[in-house]
């Protein structure tokens, strides 16, 4: 049984928010109340989640009813971006509950956006983009949910604004705590308001006659507002506002809120006493990896994300095409003690080649490794129909490999998330 959740183009499109040409990932969670190999009885366990650019899952172990959680949003972009909001408290749960953990990331690398907002439970806003250097993006919010119930959210920090001449950039607001600072100078742009966005996603930084504003941080129920641009040339843009933090008082007690450090990805930490239920994360290694079910495991939950296709960016040119993004798929299937599972994690395709003008043929890039490999890009040739042609265009880039799992003994494929297609080459 599988559920297609796709992937949003943010940094990390992962690790961190999901970024262009990023490798795939597979997350495996064993269920059935098993104790990890070598573990006996209850013990103190710490499970941590970092920025992957996809939602993850955590199954509450048997006999565990309270978990101390620390939830931190992604900080805003730039050295003066606001720190992510930190929410800590005790979660009151039932064994077998399935928590979805979405960790916020810092700014992404979207091919069509200079500073794309960070991935998260609520994405950060893009930095403003105009005639000057783009403003920094807002950080993504980090959230923990139980089905449709939002348990807790750490707001993302606001991105810094573009600096006035001779001044420091305007600081972004801290997640859950503050608005962005105004740009320096009498005509500097206003900072974005804490929780000033009309939706959970952070507002985009604004552009205008002056320097650009920073993006607002993601939050719940409202993200931060983006900073405004300076009114005249050389006057700085305002920093983005922090996104709001949140807890559900029916499930979370002993709550404490603060602001984390700048220049940090978001995170989630669970501390409890009981069997270790930490998920295992598999990344691109260019080879098949193996997972063996230990005693007591009755089901495996798998989250697989195919790798992105690749793209060739011509140096000094704005000619480029956007690569395809790998799919995301989540599902579960029954297993038994000793069952061996092959795991193939997709790797990004390789960029097509370009040797400059005068070259008759530029080879395409190889496809990325995966449970099923990505296809290679086609070569770029000099046009024989146009005598003005200066040479062959860039070769097409390779597609990303798929990520998936299969039963090792019978090569019985259980779940596959496809890789993204490579971008086409540009012509001369």
Image (spheres, helix red, strand yellow):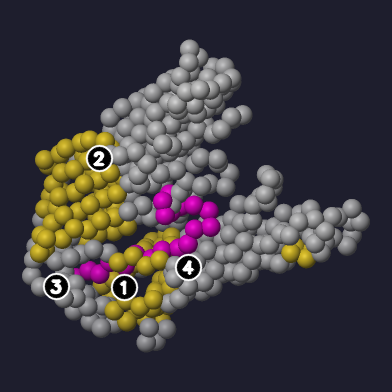
Q: Residues within 10 Å of mark 4 (few under 14, many from 20)?
A: many
Quadrant that contains the N terminus: bottom left
Please name the residue that numbered disc 4 is placed on. Answer: 346
Identify the main secondary structure in magenta. loop
Please name the residue that numbered disc 3 is placed on. Answer: 39
Marks 2/4: CA–CA distance: 33 Å
Q: Nearer the viewer, mark 1 or mark 2?
A: 2
Tell me which numbered mark, 2 or 4, is placed earlier along the sequence: 2
Tell me which numbered mark, 3 or 1, is placed earlier along the sequence: 3
78 within the magenta span: no
Task: Please give left or right for residue 115 compared with residue 50 in the image.
Answer: right
**x 38%, y 26%: residue:** 180
Q: Residue furthest right?
A: 387
Please name the residue that numbered disc 2 is placed on. Answer: 86
Marks 1/2: CA–CA distance: 35 Å
Q: Residues within 10 Å of mark 1 (few under 14, many from 20)?
A: few
Magenta stretch, residue numbers: 14-32
Tell me which numbered mark, 1 or 4, is placed earlier along the sequence: 1
Residue 416 — which label? none
Q: Nearer the viewer, residue 17 or 295?
A: 17
Q: Are marks 1 and 4 in contact (CB under 8 Å)?
A: no
Q: Is residue 266 visible?
A: yes
Please name the residue that numbered disc 1 is placed on. Answer: 333
């Amino acid at each position: 049984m599988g559920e297609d959740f796709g992937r949003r183009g943010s940094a990390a499109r992962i690790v961190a928010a999901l970024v262009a040409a990023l490798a795939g990932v597979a997350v495996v969670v064993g269920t059935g109340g098993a104790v990890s190999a070598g573990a006996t009885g209850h013990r103190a366990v710490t499970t941590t989640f970092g920025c992957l650019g996809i939602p993850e899952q955590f199954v509450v172990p048997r006999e565990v009813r309270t978990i101390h959680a620390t939830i931190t949003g992604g900080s805003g972009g730039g050295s003066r971006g606001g720190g992510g909001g930190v929410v800590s408290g005790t979660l009151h749960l039932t064994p077998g509950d399935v928590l979805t953990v979405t960790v916020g990331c810092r700014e992404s690398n979207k091919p069509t956006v200079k500073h794309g907002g960070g991935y998260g439970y609520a994405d950060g806003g893009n930095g403003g983009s105009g005639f000057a250097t783009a403003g920094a993006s807002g950080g993504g919010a980090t959230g923990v949910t139980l089905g449709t119930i939002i348990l807790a959210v750490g707001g993302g920090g606001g991105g810094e604004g573009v600096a006035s001449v001779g001044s420091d950039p305007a600081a972004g607001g801290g997640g859950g705590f503050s608005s962005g600072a105004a740009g320096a100078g009498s005509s500097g742009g206003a900072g974005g308001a804490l929780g000033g966005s009309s939706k959970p996603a952070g507002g985009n930084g604004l552009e205008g006659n002056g320097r650009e504003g920073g993006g607002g941080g993601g939050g719940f129920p409202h993200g931060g507002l983006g900073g405004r641009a300076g009114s005249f040339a050389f006057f700085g843009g305002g920093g983005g506002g922090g996104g709001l933090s949140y807890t559900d008082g029916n499930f979370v007690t002993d709550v404490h809120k603060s602001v984390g450090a700048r220049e940090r990805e978001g995170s989630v930490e669970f501390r409890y006493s009981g069997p270790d239920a930490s998920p295992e994360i598999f990344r691109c290694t260019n080879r098949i990896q193996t997972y063996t079910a230990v005693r007591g495991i009755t089901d495996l939950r798998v989250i697989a994300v195919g790798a992105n296709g690749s793209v060739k960016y011509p140096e000094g040119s704005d000619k480029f095409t956007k690569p395809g993004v790998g799919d995301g798929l989540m599902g579960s299937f029954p297993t038994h003690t000793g069952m061996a599972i092959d795991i193939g994690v997709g790797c990004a395709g390789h960029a097509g080649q370009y040797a400059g003008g005068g070259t008759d043929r530029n080879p395409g890039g190889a496809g990325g490794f995966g449970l099923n490999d990505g296809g290679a890009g086609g070569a770029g040739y000099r046009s024989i129909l146009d005598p003005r042609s200066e040479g062959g265009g860039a070769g097409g880039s390779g597609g990303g490999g798929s990520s998936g799992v299969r039963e090792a003994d019978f090569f019985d494929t259980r779940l596959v998330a496809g890789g993204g297609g490579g971008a086409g080459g540009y012509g001369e």
